[in-house]
Image: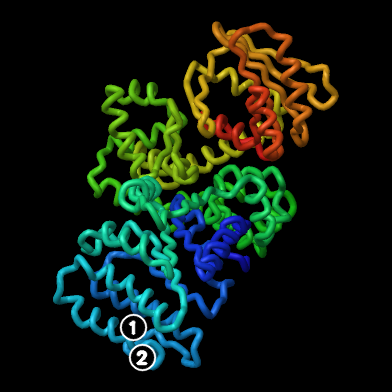
Amino acid sequence: MEEKIFDREIYLDILRKRVNGLKEGYRQNIAIIGDEQIGKTSLVFKFLDKFCDNLIVNVYLEIRPERLSDFAKRYVGALLYNFLLNSDTAPKENTDFLISKSEKYIPKTVEKIRHILNSVNKRKKNDIFAELLFLCESLHQETGKFCVIIFDEFQNLENLGFKNLYHEWSKILMTQKSTLHIIISSAKYKAREILAKNLSLLFGNFEVLTIEPLDIKTSEKYLLKMPQGEELNSDFRNFIVHFAGGYPIYLRLISEALSKQDNTAQGRALKLSAQPALLTGVLENLLFDSSGILNQKFSVYIKRFLDSGFSNSHISILCLIAEGRNKIKDIAHILKLQKKDLVLKINHLLELDIITRNADFIKINDRVFGFWLRFVYQEKLRSFSFDTKSQKEQFRKNTQNILHDFLLSAQKPLMERMSELLRLFEDETMQIKKRKIRLNHFREIKPLEFNNAQLKDGLIGRSDDCLWIMGLKHGELTEEDVSEFAKECKKYRHKLQRKIIVTLEDINANTRLKALEEKVWAWDVNNLNLLLDLYSKPWVIA
């Protein structure tokens, strides 16, 4: 596949707009945050690959464990290398060469560079970071060029030994108008904390771009662009979309593994009918086998997790969530923990961005990691023998059961699935966007028919103190649909009503405003799937 990212145009447009605005005197720093391997770095590389402007010097640096002197040398090298790209000199990845060739263009900046590099091992560390960043201002004064500094996993700067890091950085961000800073982080919790406390500025504030997983339609398009994607049966393609949870890396690894079977008997089976056994085998190779790339990735992660001082009880919490026992009260009961002690452990996991809390529910962010925890890691811990053959058979059986459950659910009418979902409610609370919702335990749930050609199907749920009225719109939801639904709901005299209209299509802004006006909750497929996720049920793919 030629593109390393897929359908992230909205983010690319923002990057282009902000960088172009820098030349016009408008500077808006950017923070890009999101889960690990969600595509943040690929997004930035895509931008850098396509962006070309002789007045802009783009400097990308991955922040990793190293000596301060090595960081300083890499920073200087990246700055000069990208500066020389627009000159008659072909740059080389050699610091001495870059300094020598840059001197005739920016002698004052090069003098400062030599001073920094000569003294970096001898001086205190509290001003080195500022001096490095001020090189961009010096370059601007000598050439009129602007700099875009990109720090990937910026929070790791803390480990390089800079003193007063954020204090010094804040001053530069507020005063240096010729440099745009783009910071990237997979540590979402920590990054937001730094932005709120340490880099909350009067001028030069960061615009936060949160990179979300690919949505369902985009995930399907991604798979269709991959080799053999169109030949994969749509039901199994939908399962892969659900299983990957919108992570491009998992979509790519699974589809590439399937396409590698092209010249085998299994490959012919893929083209003909997408046999469940083939998909199960691919997941086995990736997740169960000791040489599987995802098995190795997750095994290393768990080892580092335990080596970092987290206890087995933290792992037990994750395993319970992976099994679908993801309500706080249930986890506390199973582990025999006081709620306050459990919440403390959950907060530790939240800080590591492994989980997300939604009111009474906990969710593992990475669905594939949760699957591995449940069917590989935990099964191996429980095994009484080293018989990998029997463990492998159990893995295949579990995977086939998950696939079967998904395909069975997909065949059910949507109203039936919604009714089944409502029957799971036990007075828990959850949150959709900023709205906190009590999921009432219903004593009665029954189908409902509306006298409307466009909006016919619905459900009514009665609890002791609340009435839920739900309507299902096939196709695009309009303002008129919302108005008609609100009229239908007025026939019911219950004081506390929850009026909910569900559509599998995107909802436009005007319709959402109309729903707000009518006090109707308008849910799209993402809202519905959020609820299904909380109860460990397969997504609706539409």
Residue 88 horizontal side relative to residue 318, left or right: right
Secondary structure of the residue carrying tag 1 is helix
Q: Residue at x 39, y 84 (%)?
A: 93
- Name the quadrant of the C terminus: top right
Residue at image position (34%, 42%) is 351
What is the basis of the colouring in this image?
rainbow
Going by the numbered disc 2, the residue's amino acid type is: Glu
**Crowd band around label 2 with a 10 angstrom C-alpha radius: few (<14), some (14–19), many (20+):** some
Q: Which mark is residue 109?
A: 1
Residue 256 image offset from top left, x and y in percent? 59, 60
* Residue 497 seen anywhere in this rendered image of the structure: yes
For residue 132, what is the image quadrant? bottom left
> Which label's residue is closer to the chain start, 2 or 1?
2
Quadrant (top left, top right, bottom left, bottom right) of the N terminus = bottom right
CA neighbours of label 1 inside 10 A, class few (<14), some (14 to 19), many (20+): many
Q: Is residue 123 above or below residue 174?
A: below
Give the Cα distance between marks 2 and 1. 8 Å
Which numbered circle lies on residue 170? none
Q: Number of marks in the image? A: 2
Residue 299 visible in the current orientation: no
Q: Residue at x 40, y 62 (%)?
A: 152
Please tell me which residue is depicted at 55% across the width and 77% down the height of the picture. Answer: 53
Picture coordinates of residue 478 (x, y %)?
76, 33
Where does label 2 land, which residue?
103
Q: Position of residue 194 (x, y in %)?
A: 33, 50
Q: Nearer the viewer, residue 299 or 169?
A: 169
**At label 1, which amino acid type do we have?**
Thr
Q: Position of residue 29 (x, y in %)?
A: 45, 59
Viewed as shown, does residue 453 lie left or right of 55? Answer: right
Asked if the residues shown at circle 2 and circle 1 are in contact, with their CB atoms under 8 angstroms apart, the answer is: no
Q: Is residue 340 above or below residue 173?
A: above
